[in-house]
Structure formats: C-alpha cells, structure tokens
Amino acid sequence: MGLPFKKAGALSRRKAVFSALGAAALIGAALPTIPTAQAQTPTGYGFDATASISEEPEFSTQQLADGGTLGFDCYRIPSLGVAPNGNVLASWDGRPNNCSDAPQPNSIVGKVSTDNGATWGEQHDISAGITAEPKTGYSDPSIVVDWERGDVFNFHVKSFDAGYFTSQPGTDPDDRNVAHVAYAKSSDNGSTWVADTVITDQVVADDTWDSRFATSGNGIQLQYGAYKGRLVQPSVTRMTNGRVAAVAMLSDDHGATWYPSAPWGNSMDENKIVELSDGTLMNNSRSSGADTYRKVSYSTDGGVTWTEPTLDTQLPDPRNNASLIRVFPTAPEGSAQAKVLLFSNTATTSGRTNGTVRMSCDDGQTWPVSKVFEPGAIQYTSMATLPNGDIGML
C-alpha cells in the first residue's frame, strides 16, 4: 500500500519548501492492527501531539524561501524540529554569492511557526556569517531538542578559511584552518538564539581526526532506559589515514559538555540516528564511497559504541543526505507505535531525483510502504512530527 500523498510542487536547491502530511491517516491506513493513531505525549512536551484518523489524508506545500532574496543567492540544507512549547522550527543555509559549501561565509537562517506550519514568521538569523574579510561562515544546521530542560540546540559547521575537505588537524577555536563544530542555543522555543558556542575541542578525540562536521537535519534526546535524557547529534569525521568514519556527539548534562563516541565504519558520510522501540539506536548513513545503498549500524549503549555498518538494499541512495524519524517520538517503550519509522531520500542509485518517503512498522527491519512525492530534482529533506500529529518535511 502506498502512502496517500498528493504530488508535491517541484523542489530545487535554491528554495526552501515546507510540506505537511496528515500523518494520522497515513498511519491508520497502513497499520490497521494499531488501535489508535494518537501520538504519545511525553513529560516535558508543552503540547498534545495527537491527530485523528480521517478517510482522506491531506498533503500541502508552501515555499518558505526563494534564492535571490534577503541578501542570499541560494538556500540549501534544511533542518526541521519542534520546540518544547510546540513551535515548529525551520532552519537552513543562506548562501551568498553562489551555492558553495563552507568555507563560503554562509549563514544559518530560520523561521518559526506557531500553528503547525500553517503560517510562518519572518526569516531571521540564527548564526550570521560575515562576508567581509576576515570572513566567517556557518553551514549545515541540525536541530536537537532537550525536552527535559526546554532548550533547543542548532548544530552547524563554523568555518573561516577551511571547510570539511581542507580542514587541518587542531581544535583551537581561533584557528582559521580548522573546520569547527559549533551550535546556537535557544531557551525560548526558537524566538531568540545565543550563537557561536564552539565545541571542537570536546568532540575531537585526538590529532588524527583531521576534520569533522555535525550532519544536518536533526539529532535526538533518548527516551528509554539507562541513557534516558542523553542528547545525541550525529556527525562524520575524516582521519589522517583517509578513513571517513561516523561519530555520535553525546551529552549527559543537557548540553553543558559534549563527548564523542568511538568512531565506526569507513566511507561514511551524513547520517541520521533514531531510537528504536527497545532503546537500541539505529544509524542510517549516506556513503562517501561507491556504495549506492544506505549503511545501517546499531548501538546498545546509548551511542557510545556501534556495530559495523551493513548495506540495506531496501534503501537505494545516490550518496545523498536523508531524513529518518520515529513517527511517535516518545511512544511507550516496546509499543507498536514506537516501532513506526519514516525515512525520506532520493530513492535512486544515481542522480538526485525521485524523492520518496518510506514507512517501517518493525523498527526499520522492513520498509513495505513507500510513495514518491517528487519524481523530479530534489536535494536534502528533513522531517518532524508536528504538534497536531501531522508530519512536516522541509
């Protein structure tokens, strides 16, 4: 059974487009054995994430930004999240001059919706780049929400004169030849941000880790078991010996300090982490090598150590970023709802086309439900469960 989407408008690398899907109807149609489509609302959520089952699910799109406006020639790299009070937070790169990655003096910009994405506030800076020399840039946002404390972190690259591929070893926050890990933090549900906390020295284990970046999209806060409350932000690290490994950036003190997991895999790239119904973490990664399927790994210790990746041949991928979420973010441990995942990517082995959403009802072991929502050109996607139970995609 396919996802009951209507066709979306075309997406391009110059635009930021927000889509909303009536997720409860999707769940109700695909999972008749689940008695309710009501999302489980956790302690700490400031809203009731519920949605009713309807006969005809709704799918709508709206454009949030267009390249060539507000001082930016290009918009890329989406990140979508929900603040503790229910504000929907959208952020992306504002790129001057062209669509280049760091070390171009890019900015992280965003918009806030207080009505489940129906309307949006004005575009604002989260971390503003400096185009005049000596330049500073910020790229590749990823939202991590601390539901227990109420803070929102927006992770990103901070660059001066070097990006990921040209960064030199080191962790000095003032070193212009190092690509840094930084975040902006909001304690008022995304209304204002305190920018430019650099944590490169905390998340680099030794001087053989030449370069790194927090991968765009979203991180998570663990909801189950001994590691409940831990913040987890996925990243990728390039090492002196040429190895490109995945690394999870972890915090057990609500983001006051961070530390890296053991690196795992090779030829890794932008990756996503989701907590499964039994508390196991699953990592789903793009390849930086020749593989044209997603790489999947698991952790049973809250993200500190990981299994070696295996290819999931159910998930073709042309070496592109993707999105992976649990539909009911804090459903009871072991419940049927906790096993429901959504995955979006460009589902082809070559070329960034064929934007597809897939559903799993068994913690990502199988993906029997899929729907193409954009057959044409499409870049990155980022999804989140909205306060009313719909699924948002940026």
Image (cartoon, grey):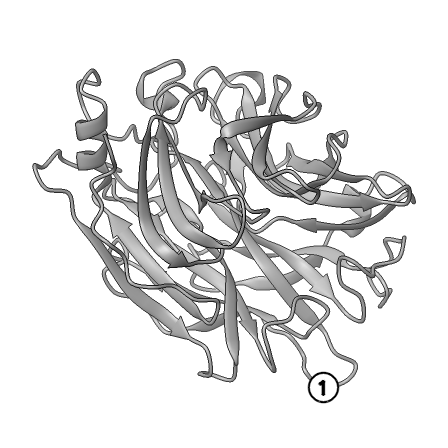
Foreground pick, 191 / 207:
207
User: Residue 356 appears in which quarter of the rendering?
Assistant: top left
Give percent across and percent down for residue 119: 25, 65
Q: Which residue is mark 1?
A: 132
Asked whether residue 87 is in view, the answer is no
Quarter of the C terminus within the rendering: bottom left
In the rendered image, the vertical position of residue 32 relative to residue 127, given as above or below: above
Which x, y percent locates residue 341? 39, 30
Q: Residue at x 53, y 63 (%)?
A: 193
Quadrant of residue 115 in the image?
bottom left
Tell whether 22 sits left or right of 259.
Answer: left
Instruction: Identify which residue is drawn at 60% across, 78% down.
Output: 98
Secondary structure under the numbered disc 1 in the rendered image? loop
Of the 4 image quadrants, the one containing the N terminus is top left
Residue farthest to the left, as pictured: 55
Name the residue rendered at 22%, 18% in the picture. Answer: 34
Res. 156 visible in picture: yes
Q: Residues within 10 Å of mark 1 (few under 14, many from 20)?
A: few
Judge left or right: residue 251 versus residue 24.
right
Q: Between residue 214 and residue 31, name the one nearer to us.
A: 31
User: Where residue 29 sits: x, y (%)?
Assistant: 17, 29
Residue 132, x across and y down, in percent: 72, 86
Left or right: where 385 falls relative to 175: left
Which is more toward the observer, 115 or 244? 244
The residue closer to the viewer here, 147 or 235, is 235
Residue at horizontal 56 percent and vertical 35 percent from the top: 294
Relative to 353, 30 lies left or right: left
Which amino acid type is marked by label 1?
Ala
